[in-house]
Image (tube, rainbow, N blue to C red):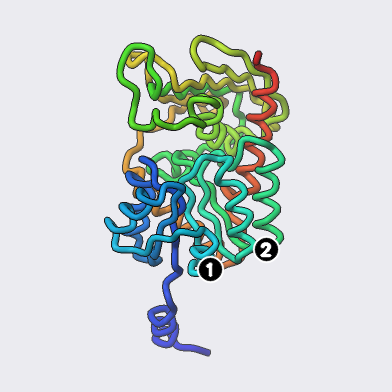
Amino acid sequence: MNSAGDAADEAVSRPRPRVGLLGTGPWARRTHAPALAAHTGSEFVGVWGRRPEAAAELAAAYRVKVYEDPDALFADCDVVAFALPPDVQAPLAVRAAAAGCHLLLDKPVATTVEDARAVAGAASEHRVASVVFLTLRFAEPTAGWVEEQAGRTGWFTASAHWLGAVFPPDGAPSAYADSPWRKAKGGLWDVGPHALSVLIPVLGDVTSVSATRGPSDLVQLALRHASGAASTAVLSLGAPSAAAGVGLELRGAAGVFGLPDWSDVPGAYGRALDALLAAARTGVPDPRGAAFGARLTEILAEAESQLPG
């Protein structure tokens, strides 16, 4: 049997997993790259992007390699972190899994059920770990709050709203407005995964959904859950600046519980990478992995199918 000292020596000598980043947009620059560079349990080794000049700039800022070919990055890495539009992410994630890379995915995994299931299937087939970065499930104190509420029973109802001013009617757009997929798909697909990522672990899987549209890109979901509880979620990226905000309230036999505020998104991203590396090391799938991401896409696609074109 190895001594504690032998185990410590083995841990020190074990090479750190190599992580490559796909994507160069504002989210990659503000969250992904800083978090990967600061992570002490892995090594940030390279960047690929659809715009070579942006990839070169981001790689130079962190003194890592710039890749002209994503498959070359896959060959050099143990983990691939994605900061790409969902329908660009999905086929590349399938290729990365086939190359043996663990997947740190962004939400939504894809905007079609077929593509989302393909990502989950590739992760399973090639036995790679996967985690979808859902901010509320990794930021603190929200992540701990969700776990605490998931341990309660007797839930009756919940209401969520995520009203972003990315494309406000009354002011300048945000730094994330230069995003064709967000403009095309709206709040349902961009912030809907966040609301569902809290409602589902607490209230149970969604057994039915109905959707209606409001002003701008606003969508209201009415959900029924496996626990019997009902919930609503109001989602938009086009809210007036003064109306923007995020909230979620749970009501049940134990009382009323409100989602706490959170901050430090790069820190949350680091914890998502921790969770991915733990799943890779133990072989135990993370509940926030690609299969959960595919389930979110199924629910959102069903909601979208009910909306007028």
Tell me if residue 147 can be seen: no
Which of the labelled discs sits on residue 289, or is there none?
A: none
What label sits on residue 126 in the rendered view?
Answer: 2
Residue drawn at the location 59% of the way across and 50% of the way down: 289
Q: In which quarter of the image is residue 68?
A: bottom left
Q: Is residue 265 left or right of residue 303?
A: left
Residue located beneath label 1 in the image: 75
Judge from the rendering whether residue 266 lies leftward or rightward of residue 1; answer left or right.
Answer: left
Q: Is the residue 81 above or below the residue 246 in the image? A: below
Marks 2 and 1: which is nearer the front? Answer: 1
156 or 86: nearer the viewer: 86
Front one among 206 and 61: 61
Image quadrant for the C terminus? top right
**Which of disc 1 and disc 2 is earlier in sequence?**
1
Q: What element carries label 2?
A: loop
Q: How crowded is mark 1: few (under 14 residues within 10 Å), some or many (20 or more)?
A: few
**Which residue extends farthest top?**
215
Which residue sits at x=61%, y=60%? 97
